[in-house]
């Protein structure tokens, strides 16, 4: 009989693309994952991984076995969900993926609360870009994801993934105190022509949103400096090297010499919690989403309307929630 832990290791390599990434996602060492794969090769008498340059690739047999492993893991998840639901208490392991600023500005308080209220629940955080986390939820590599989208770029999600809105995160234009715009109470996007921009690298949600928004306003952005970390962008603004557009969540206090100017209309990104349809009744998912919503008003600026608390919060018809008894699946991207 095939060992489920070894199948889980193979599935993780298939989802994450490498032994190292699979180990990080599972909380193991790369050596431990490699040993699991080696044992599975002996069990199946099949070569599962092939060397490709400095990495590895799954063989055809491994891809077939990984697909079977995904089905088995889904069955195990349903069994675990049923048992947890019968107990009525959040328990077991809950792997949460979150993008960087939510991992810094929102998740610490949420994780601390869950650890206090539900000591038998083992929550594990993974910092992951929203472009990747949604698919990882769909494939069973994450139990829950905190992701975001922008007003002009709705969040796509595959069939079988459900969502709840956590809140809206406004953005400000950040400029050096000596910049001509620093004294303005607000500006329009059309006024930003000719600015040197500090932004995230191409391929990220924030970068794509900035470029599309400015082009829609008739401004071709001059992307002078690119940095992944918001704190690095703030340091570059403080040095007078350009302007930046940053959300408030996880931004922290502005450095001396940096001013925030409101854009009209105010750019917004919306935060979501996403999970698989099969886990919708799991108390751990309900408790985590409830905690995310409960903590949102304390980290949002300005504060978002308070969402209801308790197990019914997943379905409460508020300004931040979808009005359904059980959240409806996220529609597929066109």
Image (cartoon, grey):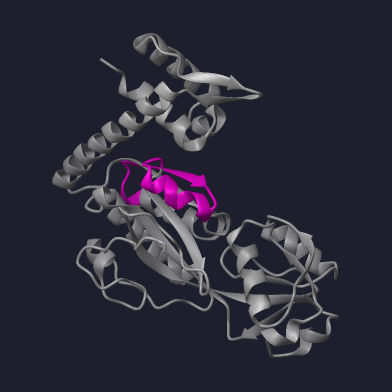
**On screen, 112 above or below 23?**
below
- As drawn, which residue projects farthest toward the left? 86
Work out whether residue 68 can be spotted. yes
**Residue 283: x and y, percent?**
24, 51
Q: Depth check: 98 or 292 in front?
A: 98
> From the viewer's perspective, is residue 17 above or below residue 6?
below
Instruction: Determine the image quadrant of residue 73.
Output: top left
Quadrant in which residue 209 is drawn: bottom right
Where residue 303 sits: x, y (%)?
48, 77
Residue shown at the point (70%, 59%) measured from the top left: 231
Relative to the observer, which residue lies in front, 4 or 309? 4
Residue 120 appears left or right of 210: left
Left or right: residue 137 versus residue 262 is left
Residue at image coords 63%, 56%: 203
Q: Is residue 96 magenta?
A: no
Position in image of residue 228 (x %, y %): 68, 55
- Left or right, 325 with reference to 110: left
**Extent of the magenta region:** 116-141
């Amino acid at each position: 009989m095939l060992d489920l832990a070894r199948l889980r290791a193979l599935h993780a390599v298939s989802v994450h693309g490498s032994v190292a990434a699979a180990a990080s996602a599972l909380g193991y060492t790369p050596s431990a994952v490699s040993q699991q794969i080696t044992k599975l090769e002996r069990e199946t008498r099949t070569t599962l991984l092939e060397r490709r340059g400095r990495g590895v690739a799954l063989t055809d047999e491994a891809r077939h076995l990984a697909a079977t492993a995904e089905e088995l893991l889904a069955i195990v998840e349903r069994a675990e969900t049923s048992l947890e639901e019968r107990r009525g208490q959040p328990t077991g392991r809950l792997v949460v993926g979150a993008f960087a600023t939510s991992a810094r500005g929102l998740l610490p308080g949420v994780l601390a609360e869950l650890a206090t209220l539900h000591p038998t629940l083992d929550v594990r955080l993974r910092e992951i870009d929203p472009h990747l986390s949604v698919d990882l939820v769909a494939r069973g590599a994450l139990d829950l994801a905190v992701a975001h989208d922008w007003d002009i770029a709705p969040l796509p999600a595959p069939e079988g993934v459900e969502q709840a809105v956590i809140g809206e995160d406004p953005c400000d234009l950040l400029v050096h105190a000596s910049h001509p715009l620093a004294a303005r109470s607000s500006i329009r996007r059309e006024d930003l022509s000719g600015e040197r921009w500090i932004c995230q690298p191409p391929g990220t949600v924030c970068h794509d949103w900035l470029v599309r928004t400015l082009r829609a306003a008739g401004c071709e952005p001059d992307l002078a400096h690119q940095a992944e970390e918001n704190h690095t962008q703030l340091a570059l603004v403080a040095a007078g090297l350009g302007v930046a557009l940053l959300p408030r969540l996880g931004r922290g206090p502005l450095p001396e010499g940096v001013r925030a100017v409101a854009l009209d209309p105010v750019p917004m990104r919306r935060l979501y919690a996403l999970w698989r349809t099969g886990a919708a009744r799991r108390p751990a998912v309900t408790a985590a989403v409830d905690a995310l919503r409960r903590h949102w008003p304390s980290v949002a600026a300005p504060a978002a309307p308070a969402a209801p608390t308790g197990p019914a919060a997943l379905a409460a018809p508020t300004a931040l929630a979808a009005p359904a008894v059980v959240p409806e699946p996220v529609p597929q991207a066109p």
